Amino acid sequence: MYLVKYIKEVRVRYAGFGKDEDEWVNVKGGVRQASTPLEPSECHKVKDGDIVLCFKESDDYALYCDACVLKITRQEHDPVECNCIFTVQYEYDNSEADVYGKDICCRPSEEKSVALALPMQSIESLWG
């Protein structure tokens, strides 16, 4: 018996472009888990060294890119708006910036994705 490993790829189609410009992307290296905006009530979960998706804006562009949290200056705030200041270093160009929680998106935490770690029932157990 031979064990064959398949490279899983997905077809990516960009809005505003034709089918001829679709790309095949390796799932493991080119697709990430969805990031969600940081809720003000959850800013305490962000730690130094975390990789976050962070909004970066200049005169020429506005984009979200990966950034490493270098330092967090915690501030008192209400559940509606986070006043904490996050010093981040963008992986895009290694620049550093101070940003607020509204500019940060985080990947789902381990505690939110526990269901994915649970083993699935075997087919035999489902059929009796």
Image: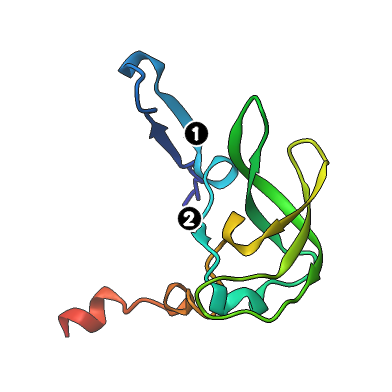
The residue pinned by badge 2 equals 34
User: Residue at the location (55% across, 79% down)?
Assistant: 41
Q: Position of residue 16 (x, y in %)?
A: 34, 21
User: Against 15, is 29 above or below?
Assistant: below
- Is mark 2 in CB contact (under 8 Å) with mark 1? no
Q: Is residue 32 left or right of residue 21?
A: right
Q: Position of residue 104 (x, y in %)?
A: 61, 58
User: Which image quadrant is residue 40 in?
Assistant: bottom right
Residue found farthest to the left = 127
Q: CA distance from mark 2 to mark 1?
A: 16 Å
User: Against 40, is 11 above or below?
Assistant: above
Identity, as a three-letter code, of the amino acid under mark 2:
Ala
Asked if residue 110 shows in the view, the reply is no
* Tally of marks: 2
User: Which image quadrant is residue 17 in?
Assistant: top left
User: Against 28, is 126 above or below?
Assistant: below
Q: Is residue 8 left or right of residue 29?
A: left
User: Against 94, is 49 above or below?
Assistant: below
Residue at disc 1, secondary structure: strand
Q: Position of residue 95 (x, y in %)?
A: 82, 41
- The numbered mark at residue 25 is 1
Identity, as a three-letter code, of the amino acid under mark 1:
Val
Pick whichever, 66 or 85, lies toward us.
Answer: 85
User: Which image quadrant is residue 38 in?
Assistant: bottom right
Pick whichever, 57 or 78, lies toward us.
Answer: 78
**Image quadrant for the C terminus?**
bottom left
The label nearer to you, 2 versus 1, is 2
